[in-house]
Image (cartoon, rainbow, N blue to C red):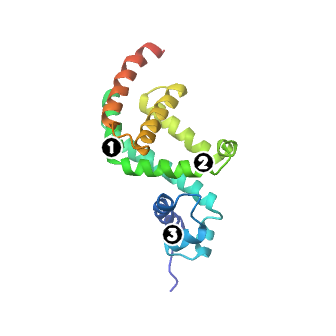
Amino acid sequence: MPKIVDHEQYRKELLDKCFDLFAQKGYASITMRQIAEGLRVSTGTLYHYFPSKQALFEQLAQEICEQDLSAALAELEGAQTLEESMEALGRHLVKNEDYFIKWTYIWIDFCQHKDSKEILKNSVFKLNNQRYHEATCNFLGIQDSVLASFVLSFVNGLILEKLWGDETIDFMEQCTLLGKMLTAYLPQHTA
């Protein structure tokens, strides 16, 4: 009797394992053959699910976006105020610091080998950015995309500082401060 394979589930399992491979080798350094070896699948199987390394990376970025948003929303569940939400965000960053640093490293490595205009035009990355912005607006209860961009840039900046080895960055402290700043800012700038 032939083995029944849930192809979508199998694709997601492969993507989950790819994260660590990209984190270990970097996007530019790893080949599809090395990825297949690391996943313990044939290159034919890998190409069946992902026609190229970039397509694999795009699908990984999409999967990470979904997982990030789901995990962050679960962490923020139950927060009653903006300050409580920002404290929950700080806890989420602390709990997942290693993951965020690795993903930032992988993303930087990918970007340094691509033309910035190509990245800006990429529909997968555009959609992911839009989803992060929408989630941030929903999280803050605002429609101001500039403020959402600021908050996302703030969080990304904190992660970059950690990546660069700044041990003085305290996610909880920074997110708590941002929560206080936003609480003071928002009533004066919403209508």
In the rendered image, the residue lying farthest to the bottom is 1
Mark nearest the camera among 1 and 2 is 2
Circle 1 crowding by C-alpha within 10 Å: few under 14, some 14–19, many from 20: some
| Number of marks drawn | 3
* Comes first in the chain, label 3 or label 2: 3
**Residue 172 pos. (x, y %):** 31, 35
Looking at the picture, tell me which residue is in the foreground, 13 or 41: 41
Say which amino acid is labelled 2. Cys
Q: Amino acid at mark 3?
A: Asp
Q: Is residue 152 visible?
A: yes
Characterize the local packing of mark 2: few (<14), some (14-19) or many (20 or more) Cα atoms within 10 angstroms: some
- SS under mark 2: helix
Left or right placement of residue 29 versus residue 122 in this view: left
The x, y position of residue 113, in whole percent, is 63, 51
Residue at position x 62%, y 61% from top? 53
Q: Amino acid at mark 1?
A: Val
In the rendering, which numbered label is found on residue 94?
Answer: 1
C-alpha separation, residue under disc 1 versus residue under disc 3: 34 Å
> Residue at label 2?
111
Relative image position of residue 69 (x, y in whole percent): 44, 44
Q: SS of the residue at dot 1?
A: helix
At 32% from the left and 27% from the top, the residue drawn is: 83
SS state under label 3: loop
CA distance for labels 1 and 2: 25 Å
Mark identifier at residue 6 = 3
Name above or below for residue 77 compared with residue 150: below
Q: Earlier in the sequence, mark 1 or mark 3?
A: 3
Image quadrant in which you'd find residue 42: bottom right
Instruction: From the top left corner, tell me how far across and down residue 40 is, in percent.
Output: 49, 75
